Image (cartoon, rainbow, N blue to C red):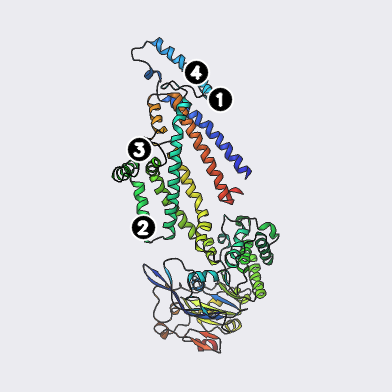
Amino acid sequence: MTGYIVSRLIQTLVTIVGISVVVFFLARLSGDATALLIPPEATAEDREALKESLGLDDPLPVQYGIFVKGIITGDFGDSFRFGEPALDVFLDRFPNTLKLAAASAVVALLGGVSVGVLGAIRAGGFVDRLTTVIALLGQAIPSFLIGIMLILFFAVELRWLPTSGMAGPKTFIMPAIASAWYSMAALTRMTRSSMLDVMETDYIRLARLKGVPERAVIWKHAFRNALVPILSLFSLQIIFFVSGSVVIEQIFAWPGIGQLTIQAIFSRDYPLVQTIVFVTSTFLVLLNLGVDLLYAVIDPRIRLA
Amino acid sequence: MPPLLEVKNLQTHFITRSGVARAVDGVTFSLERGQTLGLVGESGSGKSVTCSSIVRLLPKGSGRIVGGEVLFEGRNLLDISENEMRRIRGSQISFVTQDPMTSLNPVYSIGNQMEEPLRYHQGMRNHGQLHAKVVEALTQVGIPSPERRVKDYPHQLSGGQRQRVVTAMAIECQPSLLIADEPTTALDVTVQIQILRLLKDVQKELNLGMILVTHDLSVIARTCDKVAVMYAGRIVEEGPIDEIFARPRHPYTRSLMRAIPQIGRKEDRLYSIPGQPPDVRRLPQGCPFAPRCPDVIDRCTHEAPTEQFFGSNHRARCLRAEEMGAS
């Protein structure tokens, strides 16, 4: 177990270092930041002066060094566009994205797993066929359409829910469902097939031969074995939730980081882009580490290997 | 007192797209406590389906018991509710399954899995009590240092040890019937003998009725009191072990015996029964073994053989059974 944790920790650290390199150079590949910050008629001297003031005249390795030092001290530099510390600009929005991500993850996981298990234990029956069709639709219908339909039905027609904005628990319902929709469908299909595989095994048969009640056969014996592939898929789906969806934010006027990211990239706001990508990626890497540790808890073969 | 188990004209069919498969087609036998019945036959002859039918655990959807009776201590198991049936499984009727490598749940410890029959059938909740019972059962099946094995996971045990664990789990609740479905097929030859000996010991100790499914006649000879030979979903011959080995009445039984290689018998090639077992979805008219039978006569291809009795407990389903015994 200790060996497993140590190796995962080292991998995580290496990944974070890798992210810092990629983030730094990708931002600089997007073009010259000063071109957008200065009027076209500005002189060459003005340009140089601006570059110097932003620290962009230093050689790249030096700039990278400053960036890494900033990561450690929590100083990501000031946003070119907003003139405030980039981290503050980012942290102003990130919690909103995280809250929606958590709500979406819960909807996707609970919905996907329960419908998937139901489909698997009633395999071939009416419920199973119905859920398979719904899951297929879930993966085929784009989330913006779902979002608009939800607004039309629950906000405009029934007037049960507010159309948009972030204020109170009610406002989470529609954006969470719309952004969880695709993941829920994928998780439903994964849960169903993973459970069906497990239900065919000899140990499920032996559990039944021992007289274990069917509910315990499903939830104790089968589900825990089916869980590892479900979690793998889920940890991939979380990426979409945490990095924020521009489409969902646009439809529901959600003050998340999706919009901010696009704006930062278009205005070549290096410090802000670096902050957003680096912090979000690191957060996801740590989340993945958590999932890896969860595998070890679920499956003793991983824990004791 | 009724016999421990009496199976009467059991019929189990599988409904498939290409027709109805009569996997078990009128099987009748009985078993007393302390007795071991060997069930032999090729793959697909219906041995395993017969055993699954006794506890009503057929593959979901397609398999169905369509007729007959399974009288366990006089009570017809086909009439009771699913919940009553579940309470019998693992407490009064236990199974030792075929492949110990895949029969234990990989994510739960040996102890956890062994506690289940006690929890579900005896309502035992006390941790100390459960632990003591599990250790006792593991000791009984000859697992070394059982105290430590309780915390182990299946992948940390060898195949032979896992089969011992499965056996321990089967006898924890003191069943009266033990069904061992090819318990040694997946094991090394040296381990096979140990497991057979274990099953035999356990049976004597608890005075169990035991059904031993196998396709290996030499296993039967070593462990059973009586034998039932199955072919195409039916018992084609049944009788006491010495009777069957001394005077087999059915050509199929005789062929199976010829297929056992013997040291000292000089043969160029090993004997095997020609052809394949018939498709139980399309059984031929007449005797199903006729196309492969070395002693086939014209009548066999259109006249279905009925059971003939020889003495009180030897029966065979062959038109020529009478003359077979004489030769």
- Amino acid type at mark 4: Pro
Location of mark 3 (residue): A164
Per the model, the C-alpha gap separating discs 3 and 2 is: 34 Å
Indicate which disc residue A59 carries.
Answer: 4
Q: Could you tell me residue A38's position as x and y percent? A: 37, 16
**Which tag is nearer the camera, tag 4 or tag 3?**
3
Q: Mark 1 or mark 2, which has the lower sequence index?
A: 1
Q: Position of residue A74 (x, y in %)?
A: 53, 26
Q: Which mark is residue B214?
A: none
- Spatial CA distance of label 4 from label 1 is 21 Å
Instruction: Please provide percent x and percent y for residue A147.
Output: 34, 42
Q: CA distance from mark 4 to mark 2?
A: 62 Å
Label 2, secondary structure: give it.
helix
Give the number of the mark in front: 3 or 2. 3
Instruction: Please tell me which of labels 3 and 2 falls first in the chain.
Output: 2
Question: Which residue carries the number 1 mark?
Answer: A73
Near-viewer residue (B114 or B193) = B114
| Mark pair 3, 1: CA separation | 37 Å
Disc assigned to residue A129: 2
Chain ID, mark 2: A
Depth check: B134 or A178 in front? A178
Q: Is residue B179 above or below residue A132?
A: below
